[in-house]
Amino acid sequence: MGGSLYRGNEGMWSWVLHRITGVAIFFFLLVHVLDGALTLISPEVYDAVIGAYKTPIMGIGELGLVAAICYHAFNGLRIIIVDFVPGATRIQRGLFWGVIALCVIVMIPFAIVHLSNVFSH
């Protein structure tokens, strides 16, 4: 036995987070399509579902969704760089932390505006 394949470094966490955010985004899109289809079944039910979405808990969930999309998008660009730029595998650690930094830079202003809207009602 040569040890664990997963060593807990940035490459593994990047891979894990990419899969988790991808699945989360997929399920959001599935729910989004299904709740949109409610307009065909019953506009009243659709209005009730949309009303449930206007709660602070859902507002925090929306923040998580945007964070997942942000990470998934920037990490996808990191994957493209690693795959197509010669020697980029040697700077994977820096690229991972660059993705995290970009997400934080994008998410802070979004979170301030979004949460102020969510909790002002």
Image (tube, grey):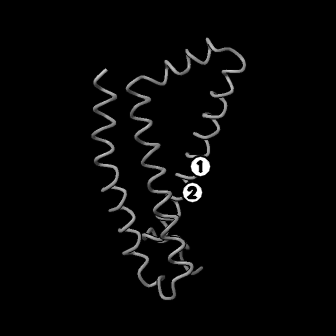
Give 20 or 58, whichever is nearer the viewer.
Answer: 58
Mark 2 — residue? 19
Give me the residue at 34% from left, 36% from top: 114
Q: Please tell me how crowded label 2 is: few (under 14), some (14-19), or many (20+) other residues with Cα within 10 Å.
A: few
User: Left or right of 75: which side holds 33?
Assistant: right
Mark 1 — residue? 23
| Residue 74 image label | none
Q: Are marks 2 and 1 in contact (CB under 8 Å)?
A: yes
Secondary structure under the numbered disc 1 in the rendered image = helix
User: Left or right of 28: which side holds 54?
Assistant: left
Quadrant including the C terminus: top left
Could you tell me how far apart the alpha carbons at marks 2 and 1 are, in whole angstroms? 6 Å
| Kind of residue indicated by mark 1 | Val
Q: Please tell me how crowded label 1 is: few (under 14), some (14-19), or many (20+) other residues with Cα within 10 Å.
A: few
| Among the 4 quarters of the image, the one containing residue 57 | top left
What is the x, y in percent for residue 1?
60, 79
Give me the residue at 59% from left, 49% from top: 23
Image: 27 above or below 35: below
What is the x, y in percent for residue 79?
53, 71
Image: 72 above or below 36: below
What is the x, y in percent for residue 38?
67, 22
Give me the residue at 44% from left, 53% from top: 70
| Kind of residue indicated by mark 2 | Arg
What is the x, y in percent for residue 120?
28, 24
Give me the residue at 43% from left, 77% from top: 92
